[in-house]
Amino acid sequence: MPRQTIYLDHNASAPLLPEARAAHIAALDLTGNPSSVHAQGRALRAVVDKARTEVAKLAGAERDQVVFTGSATEAISQAIIGGARAFKADAIVVSEGEHTAVLRAADATGLPVKRVGLDADGLIKVEQIAGAIADADRVGMRILVAVHLINNETGVMQPVDRIETLVGPSPHFLFVDAVQAFGKMVLEFASRQFDRYQHCYDVAGHQCLRELQIFPCLFSLQIRRR
């Protein structure tokens, strides 16, 4: 009897749902540039806007908080490297369990990078982040904290709510790699209390079967808080 292969590595990339495949094929039939003002351009713009609305709904975000990028790695690089420059960060704080893309982006900033540890259960040691923030506050430094919501290898859900509380009432910047959470758990980005600080999530569609509806498997996005 021939062996049957069952693909289970959905954390790396998931197979497309039929609805996503159909949306992808329909989008490929469209010609034009969504920035153009002629009929073809407007038609494409409507498709992109529809996708943005649907992604925002899935992420619990507002439409204008969604920015499409070419990959999760690109979104991570924009958020960490661009965020560090834009908010004049003096140092980066990451955990030892971060994805390689996060660690490389942190190193690429050229700033000092502090790595906080994980406990025996694979959870980020939040007290070490609290210590790094306290140390930065004492000397007037601004830091960018980059952590993941769900680990891509172990599936451990990190205590991001606690980290958000630490970063919240401060001048620091928080980036959350939520790629493994998107489409699998409620994010409710827009309802979080971010009014007093800068906050960014990145998510991806190719790991949850169905997103994104225009170009599934090709695009991920960055969600930003202004």
Image (spheres, grey):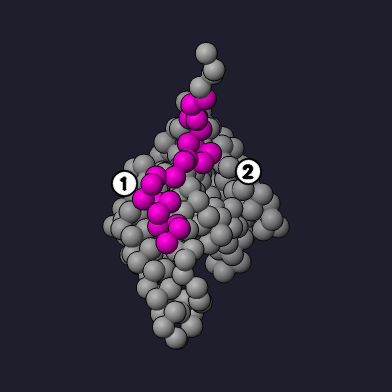
Q: Which mark is residue 210?
A: none
Q: Amino acid at mark 2?
A: Thr
Q: Residue at x 59, y 64 (%)?
A: 82
Q: Position of residue 194 (x, y in %)?
A: 36, 60
Q: Residue at x 38, y 47 (%)?
A: 18
Q: Sort mark 2 into few (<14), some (14-19) or many (20+) by Cα contacts within 10 Å.
A: few
As drawn, is 180 to the left or to the right of 86?
Answer: left
Q: Residue at x 42, y 61 (%)?
A: 26
As drawn, is 83 to the left or to the right of 179?
Answer: right
As drawn, is 108 to the left or to the right of 141?
Answer: right
Q: Amino acid at mark 1?
A: Val
The residue closer to the viewer here, 178 or 139, is: 178
The secondary structure type at the circle numbered 2 is helix
Residue with the mark numbered 1: 186
Could one spot residue 218 in this view of the protein? yes
The secondary structure type at the circle numbered 1 is loop
Could one spot residue 172 in this view of the protein? no
Magenta residues? Answer: 5-26
Q: Position of residue 75 (x, y in %)?
A: 54, 58
Is 16 magenta? The answer is yes
User: Quadrant of the rendered structure where residue 56 is?
Assistant: bottom left
Q: Position of residue 143 (x, y in %)?
A: 55, 56
Q: Sort mark 1 into few (<14), some (14-19) or many (20+) by Cα contacts within 10 Å.
A: few
> Which residue is farthest front?
1
Is 149 magenta? The answer is no
Q: Quadrant of the C terminus?
A: bottom left
Q: Is residue 10 above or below residue 52?
A: above
Distance CA(mark 1)–CA(mark 2): 25 Å
Residue with the mark numbered 2: 100
Q: Residue at x 44, y 45 (%)?
A: 16
Q: Position of residue 161 (x, y in %)?
A: 37, 45
Q: Is residue 41 above or below residue 66?
A: below
